[in-house]
Amino acid sequence: MPRRSLSESGYYHVVVRSAGKVALFEDDADRRCYLRLLKEAREKTGARIMSLQDPTKKMSKSDENTAGFITMLDTPAEIMKKFKRAVTDSEARVYYGENKAGINNLMGIYSCITGKSYDEIEKEFEGRGYGDFKTAVGEAVVKELEPIQARYNELIKDKAYLEKCYSEAAPRAEAIARRTLQKVMKKVGYLPVAH
């Protein structure tokens, strides 16, 4: 599998935003479009990222154990710490197999980011322990998130740009929210909201 380009990585970020839009937009055509995009992304990746602390559970930002998941804005030090503490078995040999949920999960993450196959990963870390592998996975994730974090930090400091964005988007968001609220109130028996 070839390494994903930055533009392809951007595809995954569009998918995340699209999930929110599915919930927000009421237009069926919009919803169908976003749902199709989400389905295609799921089929394309075929991977599920599991918790770093309980690799039998899906990684989730709602996990009470913050060491179990990575956020887009975790610092490099936080990311490295989470990967170094990731739960693994005691075998200390990097390969994909049964009863190796932690290592299987880390291999999936590393493969997704680097484009390397499991066989290539096994060869790369042959004779090396889990410490080296966890460090490599953490470093790969840090590198992958660097441009995203850099762009976020650039935008978050540009107060004029942010104000322009939310000022331009506010009327549309308000109109969508008003329509949704009116539908909800009608369904529960309240009078429609006055404009």
Image (spheres, helix red, strand yellow):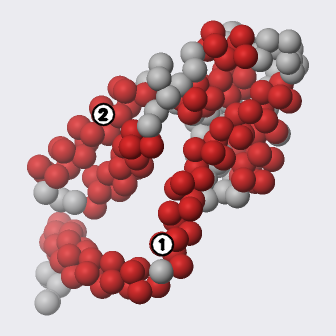
| Residue at the far bottom in the pictured view | 195
Which of the labelled discs sits on residue 115, or is there none?
none
Q: Position of residue 18 (x, y in %)?
A: 32, 51
> Along the line of sight, which residue is nearer the eye, 184 or 81?
81
Residue 163 percent location from the top left of the image: 38, 85
Residue at point 57%, 16% (across, down): 117
Is residue 101 placed above or below 13 in the rendered structure? above
**Does 127 appear above or below 30?**
above
Q: Which residue is mark 2?
A: 39
CA separation in Å, label 2 and label 1? 30 Å
- Dot 2 alpha-carbon crowd within 10 angstroms: few under 14, some 14 to 19, many 20 or more: few
Q: Quadrant of residue 182?
A: bottom left
Judge whether residue 189 can be spotted in this image: no
Question: Do we see residue 137 in this rendering?
Answer: yes
In this rendering, would 17 be left or right of 170?
right
Using residue 96 as the reference point, say whether residue 157 is left or right of it: left
Q: Residue at x 54, y 54 (%)?
A: 147
* Residue identified by numbered label 1: 155
Q: Residues within 10 Å of mark 1 (few under 14, many from 20)?
A: few
Task: Classify 32 as above or below 78.
Answer: above
